[in-house]
């Protein structure tokens, strides 16, 4: 559940920032496209970061 939340948060944040960027600067649709891609990349990065920290934690729990 946490991994999907991390990914969706990145994409939503990118979409909202892109929409705001377009609205105030009048650059429709480029800001939305660019920031959605950045949000997607950030979401993937966060998922990788969290999953590696979760695996390290589970390895520590298994150690005697």
Image (cartoon, rainbow, N blue to C red):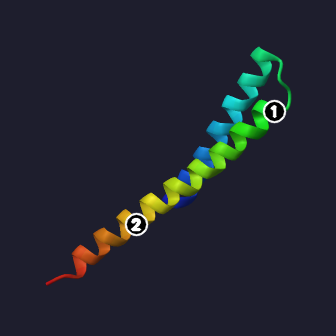
The residue positioned 72% from the left and 31% from the top of the image is: 18
Nearer the N terminus, badge 2 or badge 1? 1
Where 23 sits versus 37, above or below?
A: above
State the separation of the CA atoms marked 2 and 1: 33 Å
**Residue 13 percent coordinates (x, y):** 62, 37
Q: Quadrant of residue 12?
A: top right
Mark carried by residue 52: 2
Where 10 sits versus 54, above or below?
A: above
**Residue 58 percent coordinates (x, y):** 31, 74
Q: Quadrant of residue 53?
A: bottom left
The residue positioned 78% from the left and 39% from the top of the image is: 33
Q: Pointer 2: residues within 10 angstroms few (<14), some, or many (20+)?
A: few
Q: Nearer the viewer, mark 2 or mark 1?
A: 1
Mark carried by residue 30: 1
Mark carried by residue 50: none
Q: Quadrant of residue 30?
A: top right
**Residue 42 percent coordinates (x, y):** 57, 48
Where 23 sits versus 46, above or below?
A: above
SS at mark 2 in the image: helix
The residue positioned 71% from the left and 42% from the top of the image is: 36
Q: Do the residues labelled 2 and 1 touch (CB within 8 Å)?
A: no
| Residue furthest out toward the right | 28
| Residue furthest out toward the top | 24
| Residue furthest out toward the bottom | 64
**Residue 1 percent coordinates (x, y):** 52, 61
Q: In this view, does 62 lie to the left or right of 14?
A: left
SS at mark 1 in the image: helix
């Amino acid at each position: 559940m946490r991994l999907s939340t991390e990914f969706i948060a990145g994409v939503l944040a990118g979409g909202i920032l892109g929409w705001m960027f377009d609205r105030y600067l009048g650059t429709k649709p480029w800001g939305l496209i660019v920031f959605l891609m950045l949000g997607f990349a950030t979401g993937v990065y966060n998922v990788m970061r969290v999953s590696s920290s979760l695996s390290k934690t589970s390895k520590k729990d298994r150690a005697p």
